[in-house]
Each structure stands twice: as C-alpha cells, then as structure tokens.
Amino acid sequence: MKTRYSYGGDEHIFVEMDEEMSLDAFFKALFITNAVRDAKIKGVTEICPANASMQIKFDPDVIKPADMLSELKKFESVAAKAEPVIKTRIIEIPVYYNDPWTHETLMRFRERHQDPKSTDIEYAARINNLDGPDGFIKAHSGAPWFVSMVGFVAGLPFLYQMVDRQRQIEAPKYLRPRTDTPKLTVGHGGCFGCIYSVRGAGGYQMFGITPMPIYDPNQKISYLRDFMCLFKPGDIVKWKPIDRAQYDATVADVDAGKFAPLMRNVTFSLADFHKDIDASNHKLDEVLHGH
Amino acid sequence: MAIKVLKPGLATTVQDLGRPGYYNIGIPLSGGMDRLATRAANMLVGNDEGAAVLEAVFMGPELEFTADATVAVTGADLPPKLDGAARETWTSFSVKKGQVLSFEFLKKGARAYIAVSGGIDVPVVLGSRSTYALGALGGFKGRKLEAGDELPVGHGKGAKDGRSVPANLRRAPGNPAELRMVPGLYWHRITEEAGKHFFADTWKVAPEADRIGYRFKGGRPLDFVPRQQPFGAGSDPSNIVDACYPYGSIQVPGGTEPIVLHRDAVSGGGYFMVGTVISADMDLIGQLQPHTQARFVGVDLDTALKARHEREGVIEKIRAALS
C-alpha cells in the first residue's frame, strides 16, 4: 500500500490508501478518519471515509492547506500503529432476491445490459462461476459484508464482502446507466454491493430488494428516529434471503412501526479475520443470532 | 406572513448557505449555487446573510404576498415585476400585502436569488433550510415549489427601498466562461497530451446541467495512461475504486465529457477526476446556461487562495456599500 495525498482545490485534501480495494486499505482509511475526527481540528468541516481512501473538507481561511496536509500526514503513522480492531454493529438485512420490481426494471433497461438475454442475477452467477441464481444467492448471503463507504446519495451503503479475493463477486456496471432503480434495490458493481436508499438513476446490477427502509428524511420509521440514515462506515451487514410472504409481512410490520432490525454490537479483529476467514465470519454469525 | 406560489417557475427551491457536516453519509452541502448572490440578496433586504431565499433557475415564479415585505432579486438578470410594473435586479424594493411578484424572461445568467425580509421560514433540517431534492430533505417538503404552495416567512426588520449593489460588484461569468481549477486527484491517469488539450479546448455546457453537476461537451476525448486496472476499480480506464468526490471536482466518465459536481453533488463514486474547480469560481458555474462556452484554466493552490481572498473582498465591499 502506498499512501497518496492530493489537494482537491483550495478546500479539500484527498488521501488514497491504495489504488486497489482491500480490507487493509479500508481499515487504514477508517482509522485515519477516526483520528482526524477525534483531533477536532479547527476549520475541518467534513471528514469522509471511502473504500480505500478518505477526504476532508476544510476552511483554508482557518487552517492553511499546507498545515492541514502536515496534520493529516501525522495521522497516517498513528493509523499504521493502531491495532486493527473495531467495535461495531452487525445488522441482518432481509433480501427478497429475484423480486418482481427489480425484475420489471431490469427488463425495461435490457438493451443497456451486457447480456440482454439473461437477468442480472443469472449473468452475475455465470461470470462468477456460480451455480445459477441459487448458487449466487448462497454466495451472496453466505458471508457478511463491510459497509466500506456511505454516500453517492443520502444513506446509500457501499458493501465489500468479507471473503478472500478469489471468492469476491465481481460484476461490471450496466453498459449505460439506467434512469430508474427501485428504492431499496440490492445492487452490485465492480466488487461492491449496495442498497439504493432512494429511487433514481443507477448502473449497478440488480439482484433483489429489501423490505427494510435505510433512509427516512421524515424520521417516522421507528429505528430511524434518532438519525435518518441507518448505516455508518464500519458496520457489518449479513443478508437474509426471504420469500414474497416474508417480504410482504415485513413491509406491513415496518408500516405499523413494529419492525426492528436484528442488530448486535460486535468486536471485529482484522488480524483474526486474516488468520481464518471462515472462523471469523462464523463467530459474527453467532453474535448475530445470540448464541 | 406567507407567500402564495401562483406559478412555481421551472425548478424553484428554498436555499440558504448550505448543510455542511453530513457528506460522509452522502448528504450534500446544498445551498445556493451562487453564494455571493445569495448573500447579497439577504443583505439587501436586511436579513442575516445565511437566511433562506428562493433559487429560481432559467425562469421566475409568480408569488403573491400576504403581508408587506422588502424583496430583492440578485444573481441572473431575471427582471422582476411587481403587479406588472418593472423593478430592478440587485436592488431592494417594497411589496405591499396582496401584490404579485412575477418575472420577465431570463436575459443573462441562469439562477436568480429572491430574498424576502424575514427569510423563508421552512423548518431547519440538519442545520439548514436548503432543499436537497434527490433525498427529499429540507426546503419546502423536500422538493421544488409547486403551484398552490404557501411558504412561511419569518419576521424581519426589512430595509429601505432602492438599496443597490454597485454594478462593479455583481460578479458574473465571461463568455467563454473561464473556470479555474487545480489539477490533481487522479490527474496522473491522463496523458500529458490529453492534459494539454483539456485546457486548450473550448467546451460547451451540456443540457444536463443542474444542482448536482454541470456536464461539458465539445472538447477532445482524453487519452489514458495505460495500466492494469486495480482490483475493485472496474474495467473502464476512467474507473477507480469508488472514492469521495470533492465539491467542485471534475470527473470525466469514459474520458469524454467532464462533469463538475456542485452543491447537490453525489458524494462519491467510481469515476476518476482530473482536479477541482477553485472555490472562488463555483458561483460562476451556477450562472451558466446550457450551450454557453467555457474553458478550464489550470492554476496552482496559491492562485486559488488569492482568488478566494479577492472574492471575499468583493463580498466585504458589498457589505460596506449596504451598511
């Protein structure tokens, strides 16, 4: 990993941990982000971690760009020494794979897809050497994912699966972006999964939909009353495949204010993960289900 | 008091100076795209500079006032009319209860800022009254205005009629517009030759130009330095591992059409960026109409900071002229 710094005009500094994606790069970005936040540097207005990079926005009338840059460089060595252990949350997200709404949408934009003759999930299964949609769903929901960035639009999580690189699901974006994506679509582009927090344009492959809102600007949904966005970088997500009946029941529960996401606090060690990925993921599952 | 929206205009939204602090979860800065004009409009009517105003793009709304107020229109040359009688832009005027404010066709620029004494008093959401339409957040019901809306207005002391911002302090883009930018971020992805013609070519504002970003067309496509794409970046040479997009950053998907992100920016994504437009010139972008010619001018950080201070100096002079 080689850290690279760049000014983004007179109000931003961009720090790239690595050109390629890895959990190590993500952890480094997260640690620098936390260190900058804790330092409460006067003049800093935004601190944004991303997948393998981070960015700050600052007021150059309060702190000179060169001073800001040298402050940031100090945190790089602090982050490098930090033990890669975080206290975070694991959240179960129900997914209705192959649902009728994303299906209708993907059929509508078929001519913009690499493979107009199959669905997004069939295509992704094939190019990742998985055994059809069922094999794909098993791989997709079998291991947890890190929320490695929140953004693009309000509350949208980018997700990176916690498996070795050989098992990473990879899929290109649509040839040309769609002008429509149903709200709460579970998507995938490059090596990243996502949940579309609002309806709108998008280029990621569409695999399913969750009945569980993740962004509510009116803060009426019970579990979004404290804050309108559910996800923070560093959260861990585990997908739970559900069918139409479970989907409908969950939607009704959300509407009635009765739905509470399954969510547990957990400590995650990157060193333990690297030592034995499956054992580390198994432990997360146990925490989630209260064993 | 309230303002009744008789006609909404094209895309009129409530904006103030923005909503910093939430970009890390994808909630953009928002706020008026022309910040100098937003501040000046408020100063003219005796408001705090950060009070909420209406931002009208390309076409003005038609508004009926339910009480007396002071009003000013700044930014684009979108001439106001009061009960059909002409009023001046960049100049305060009083409005009586029952009068209707409407607008002539747009003459120059793109966005007008309509300030009312007391400010538009929609609820403050995450520290701001600005509208973020994509996220249905803030402003009036999280959306652009519609006919029949009634906008609450706060209590203001108002200001005298006929206060005016001196003509030399009304900042507007030239033609072609010159947008100064600091090369950086992923500038190294394009060849030296491509970097040269990025600055040499004259671009044109594309029809896709809104609060999220401004797209430019007409320059030569940019050639990339060949490389093995990094894991997770995607296969196109313009792809990167999804990263944060600075406000003002210039991304060039596929190397063809640069997009400058503005106040309602998408906060991150997978396209490389060649650099960032300097803070002093972001106001100018908000005043560009589609098909306007523009050039990018590469500058260093010192020049960017100097320009920032010059622009702040203009705002200081407006304050002094109106105090």
Image (cartoon, coloured by chain):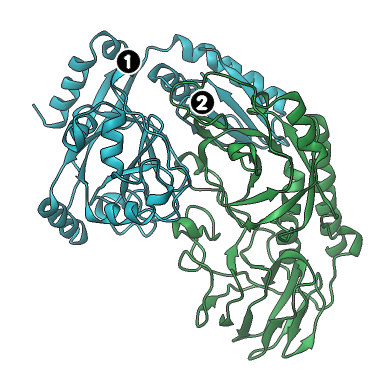
Chain colours: A cyan, B green
Mark 1 Cα shell of 10 Å, populated few (<14), some (14-19), many (≥20): some
Residue B290 sits in which quadrant?
Answer: bottom right
Q: Is residue A104 visible?
A: yes
- Is B185 situated left or right of A289 in this image? right
**Subunit that carries the residue with mark 1:** A
SS label for mark 1: helix
Where residue A130 appears, as percent x and y from the top left, is 22, 28
Task: Please state which of residues A23 and B229 is positioned toward the viewer in this rendering.
Answer: B229
Earlier in the chain: of badge 1 and badge 2, it is 2
Q: Where is residue A44, by image quadrant?
A: top right
Residue A258 shows up from this direction: no
- Indicate which disc residue B263 carries: none
Q: Amino acid at mark 1?
A: Leu
Name the one closer to the observer, B62 or A117.
A117
User: Measured along the vertical axis of the image, is residue B276 above or below residue A185?
Assistant: above
Disc 1 to disc 2, C-alpha distance = 18 Å
Image mark 2: chain:
A
Q: Amino acid at mark 2?
A: Ser
Which residue is rendered at x = 19% and y = 24% of the image?
A284
Please state if B101 lies on the left or on the right of A45 as rendered: right
The residue at which mark 1 appears reads as A270
Q: Position of residue B171 (x, y in %)?
A: 83, 57
| Residue at 63% over, 91% down | B98
Comparing B59 with A115, the one in front is A115
**Which residue is outermost to the left?**
A291
Element marked by disc 2 = strand
A92 over B38 or under it: above or below = above
Residue named by callout 2: A53
